[in-house]
Image: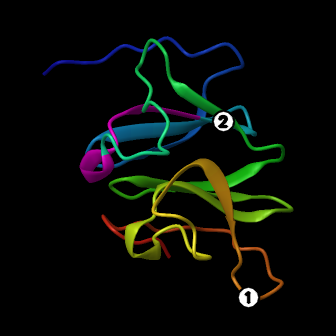
Amino acid sequence: LDILSIPPPAGGGATQVATSDVRTCFVQGVVNVVCFGAWGEAAGASGLPAPGTAADPDVREMGDEVVDLALGLSHTCVCVSGVGVVCWGDSSDNKLGGGAPSSSGDVVIVNLGFSREPARLAAGRNHMC
């Protein structure tokens, strides 16, 4: 058994962790999402940021408390307090919702069509609920 030892980045340790086939993300403190690994089937897709490595992760500041975190194969979504669901990554088949372009390194705020704030996310390989 090989154990990967990753020192926590400046700002604290992980409060939530989510994994996909090829990536791992964690919530650092309460507002940062830190990811490393590959983008799966979307690897090399235009518009996607470098996936990040353990030594140089992709860090995203959400601006408010991250309530939940979930990963599909090539996309990431988080519930952000006061904002709603925010996603980035591969949006083929509208995985990111809201008619987002096929790939977006930028975050997409998903319009759920109702005023309640979601509290939990569940991910499949190619979808998010």
Residue on which the image places disc 2: 60
The residue shown at (83%, 84%) is 115
How dense is the environment of label 1, judged by Cα within 10 Å: few (below 14), some, or many (20 and up)? few
Residue on which the image places disc 1: 113
N-term-proximal mark, 1 vs 2: 2
Direction from residue 90 to residue 13 in the image, left or right: right
The residue shown at (75%, 44%) is 62
Classify residue 110 by image quadrant.
Answer: bottom right
- Magenta span has 35? yes
The residue shown at (40%, 38%) is 24
Which residue occupies the foreground of this view, 3 or 121?
121
Percent position of residue 121, x then y = 55, 67
Magenta region: 34-42
Name the element at disc 1.
Answer: loop
Q: Amino acid at mark 2?
A: Arg
Image quarter where the N terminus lies is top left
Residue 116, placed above or below residue 38? below
